[in-house]
Amino acid sequence: MNLNKINTVYFIGIGGIGMSNLVRYLHLIGKKVLGYDKTETPLTDALQSEGIFVRYTIDLNWVLQQNFDKDTTLIVFTPAVKQEEHKELDYFITNGFQVIKRSKLLGLVTKDTICLAVAGTHGKTTTSTLLGHILKDANVPATSFLGGISENYHTNLIVGGATYSVVEADEYDRSFLNLNPDYACITATDADHLDIYSDASDFEKTFKEFAALVSQKVIVRKGLHLKGQTFGIEEDSDYQAKNIRVINGAFVFDVKTPTAAIENVTLNMPGRHNVLNAMAALALADSIGVDLEKISNAIESFKGVERRFSYRIKSENKVLIDDYAHHPTELNALYNAVRELYPDEKLTIVFQPHTFTRTRDFFEGFKRSLAQFDEIYLLPIYAAREHPLDGITSENLANEIQKINSNAHFINNDLAIETIKKNNNKIILMVGAGNIGEMVTEVVNELTNIK
C-alpha cells in the first residue's frame, strides 16, 4: 500500500492511546483524519481541540453520506473492535475499502525509517518514552510513537525528524510482527494475553519471531531465553547498571556498556524496575551512536509518563499515586517501589482489573500481589473488548484475597470516591488500565477540597 495515494484516513477506535499517535502524525503531514470512538475521553477531547473530527455514534447512514472514495480512503481499526460487532467496519470490509489494523499502519509509517522498537510484557511505554526523550534531547532526527502521554511533552507523539522512529512493539494480537525493526529491545516475556496465545510457550515463541525480524541488533533483559546483547542491573551483562544508590529521592548509578562507562547517571523515577527501563533505553540510544553523556543528561531530565507512578497529590498528610499496572508482575513492582519510599506507612490500593480473560488467567497472581497491600479495594472488571466470563468477577477475587488479607473489599464504581475520601491511610494508590484513570481527577478534586 502506498500512503502517498491516501487522502483520507478514517479511524475506528480513534481515541485509543496507540491509535491516537498515528492520528496526530497523519494529521500533521496533511491527511484528512477523522474517526469514531465509543466514548468521549480527555484524549478524544484533545484530538478534537487539535482540529480532528471525532464522533461517538455508530451510524451507517452518516458513513454513506460522506461518499468516501475507495481508492483514496484508508480505514484503520483497533483489534479491540471486533468484526461483525461494528456495522461501519463491516460495511467498509464488505464494500472493498482498504481496511487495515493499527499495527499494519504503524509498520507502513515507519518502514522507511531506521526503526527502534521496544517490546516486552512490562516497561514498553516508559522505555520508549524515555528513548524518545533521549533522541529529542540529543537532537537526533526521530519521531516517537508512544503508548502513553509523556510528562515532558504532554503528548504521545514526539516529532523530531524522519530518519529514525521509536515505536512500542505491542505483542497483543501479535501486532509487533507487522513492524520492520532495525533495532529492538525486549524487556520481559512474562505471559499475558492468553486470550490470543495458547500458552506461555506460544507467547515466548512469538517474541522469538519478532526478534528474527530485527535487521541490526536485538537487546534483551539478562535472563530471558532470547539471543542478543543483554542489559541488567548488578549482574554480568553487556549493558550493566551498578553501584545503585538512592540520593535525594532519585536513583543514581554507574553504567558499563560494551565499549565505555559513565558514572553517576541520575533517574528521577521510583522503583528499581525503572532503572531496568532506563538501561534498555540507554542501550538502544548507544547502539545508534548517541553520546553517553547526552544520554545521561536526558535520563536526568526525564519526567516520566502519565499514569506510570504519577503523583497526583503529594503533601505531608496525603499522597495519591496514579498507576497503569494491570498484571501481577507490575503490581509487585509497584508495591516494591512504594514500600521502598514509604517503609512505615500503610498502603491503600484501589484496583480496577482489566479484562475478564487476564483476570481469569492470572487469578492466583493477582490474589498474591494485591494481598501485599495493607488495604485493598477492588472495582468491577473493566471489560474493554471482552464479554463477561462466568465466575470471573472482582467480588470473587476480593473474597479470595480475604483468605490472605482480611482488609480486601469489593466496591462499585459509584462508591469509589466516597470510599477513598473516608480512608485514613496516608498513601492511596489508584491502579489499573481501564477508565480508573479518568476517575482520578475527580478524586483529586474531592481530596484537595477536604478542609
Image (tube, rainbow, N blue to C red):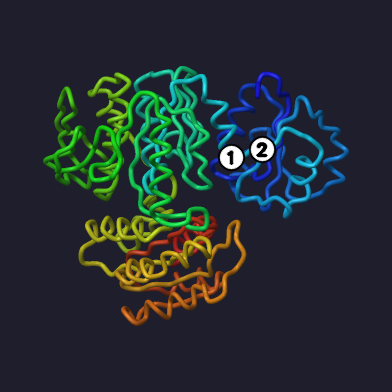
Left or right of residue 53, residue 355 in this image: left
Residue at 57%, 70% (x, y): give it: 389
Q: Answer with the quarter of the image where residue 399 lies.
A: bottom left
Callout 2: SS: strand
Q: Where is residue 28 shown, x and y percent of the image?
A: 61, 25
Q: Residue 148, can we see it?
A: no
Query: As shown in the figure, which amino acid type bears the numbered disc 1?
Result: Met
Q: Residue 169, can we see it?
A: yes
Q: Answer with the quarter of the image where residue 181 lies.
A: top left
Is 112 in front, or is 96? 96
Q: Single out the mark in the foreground, 1 or 2.
A: 2
Instruction: State the mark number for residue 79.
Output: none
Q: How many marks?
A: 2
Marked residue nearer the N-terminal end (1 or 2): 1
CA distance for labels 1 and 2:
9 Å
Position of 358 relative to 112 (above/below): below
Q: Where is residue 277 shown, x and y percent of the image?
A: 31, 41
Q: Which residue is mark 2?
A: 76
Q: Answer with the quarter of the image where residue 262 lies.
A: top left
Is 190 in front, or is 331? 190
Query: As shown in the figure, which amino acid type bears the numbered disc 2?
Result: Val
Residue at 83%, 41% (x, y): give it: 63
Residue at 53%, 34% (x, y): give it: 178
Quarter of the image that includes the N terminus: top right
Q: Is the residue marked by circle 1 packed among few (<14), some (14-19), or many (20+) residues within 10 Å?
A: many
Left or right of residue 53, residue 270 in this image: left
Q: Which residue is mark 1?
A: 19
Is 265 in front, or is 95? 95
